[in-house]
Image (cartoon, rainbow, N blue to C red):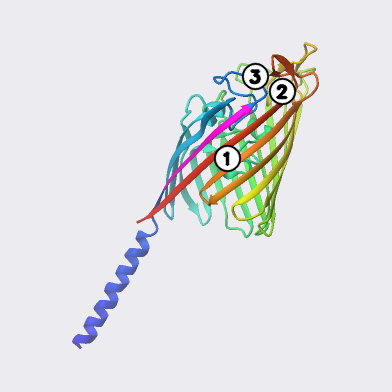
Amino acid sequence: MKKILISIGLCILGYFTATAQEEESTHSIKISSYADGYFAGYSNDLSQTELQPFITVGARDNSFGVNVAQFGISYEHEKVRSNITLHYGDIAEATWSSEFNMIQEANVGILLADGLWLDAGFFRTHIGTESFLPKNNMLSSTAFKTFNEPFYQAGARLSYDQLDDWYFEVWALNGYNSFVDNNDAKSFGALVSYKFSENTSLTYTNLYGRESEDDVSPNQNRLYQNIYLNHNWDDKIFLTVGFDYGLQSNSDLNNPSDTASMYAGVFTARYQFTPIWSVTGRAEIFRDENGFISGTTMNTAGDVTGFDLTGYTLGAEYRPASSTYLRAEVRHTSTQDDLEIFINDGDPTNNRFEVLFTLGLEIDKVFKF
């Protein structure tokens, strides 16, 4: 009898010990850090204190610099999660909010139902084919359309991931590329992603809202849409194709009461020679003739116009470990003939050449308790 009681007691103790361990493992904290340094050179003559136009990564000419140095901490539980990332560097200076320049993201979420999360706070954008962070892309430099898409946003997100191969997000936001709103209206957006297979996925994103300030009449309402396809063949050839299309009411330069439109596209392909060596090429276009996304400038005829850009990039990557990379890239940019926005040897030109070297390292550590 004594042996039976001891056995039962050991079983009960083992059950509670296993249960406690299981409960403990439901909490996790992830500490992450990432740094990317660069050297860049441009044919466009600007001083090192000036940032090159339409450049996110490696924005200073003939300079060594830091694209980003960031630190993040995230917490996850079965029903609660939170995330904060702080960053510093030329990416933040070239693209980020002046009000909260060092905050890349800061948000908290709760589980409402199985697979349904509500998150609120500051976020990185849900729109775009590429990320603004080099570590997340096949090339370190970003496309012109990426430079003109939102980088950050403030608001709330509903996400759902319990349907096979489907993922959904619905957003309520302050506005387009905004932490602090410029009007009393709100913007709304969505993300829908479908996974055809382990190698192929298609994602659509959008954002709609009033972008004009409260004292501007008539209102300027913007609809921005992005769609992109990712595919790879046998982990050797990687392909990304993205297209953006935007509309904004009462924004045509020739007839201010008409709706203006813009479009942009990018095609990126990588060939992975070995696990550590690869080469990547990218072709891109950006057409915003009315400048409601990219802003306006003056052409050689003295007319106000938006931007029309074409670019080609070729890059190579050496990745000795999964957490680090060394990249070298060359790129040629051209604008329409009458838009000489670059300076080469003191003369206006519609062409720019650039070289970019980046070296990055990412470190993550997860603690469970």
Image-based side of 63 in relation to 332, left or right = left
What distance separates the C-alpha of mark 3 from that of mark 1? 25 Å
Instruction: Give the label on residue 134, or none.
Output: 1
The reply to whether discs 3 and 1 touch (Cβ–Cβ < 8 Å) is no
In the displayed orientation, state which residue is furthest to the bottom.
Answer: 1
Q: Which class describes the residues within 10 Å of circle 3: few (<14), some (14-19), or many (20+)?
A: some
Q: Which residues are magenta?
A: 31-41
Point out the image quarter for the C terminus.
Answer: bottom left
Say which label, 2 or 1, has the lower sequence index.
1
Total labels drawn: 3
Q: Amino acid at mark 2?
A: Gly
Residue 289 at x, y percent in the picture: 76, 24
The reply to whether discs 2 and 1 touch (Cβ–Cβ < 8 Å) is no
Q: Can you identify the residue that label 3 sits on? A: 45
Q: Can you identify the residue that label 2 sits on? A: 291
Q: Amino acid at mark 3?
A: Asp
What distance separates the C-alpha of mark 2 from that of mark 3? 24 Å
Q: Which class describes the residues within 10 Å of circle 1: few (<14), some (14-19), or many (20+)?
A: many
- Residue at 61 percent of width and 45 percent of height: 317
Residue 224 at x, y percent in the picture: 68, 34
Image-based side of 164 in relation to 334, left or right = left
Residue 135 at x, y percent in the picture: 56, 43
Residue 124's image quarter? top right
- Give the overall secondary structure of the magenta segment: strand
Say which label, 3 or 1, has the lower sequence index.
3
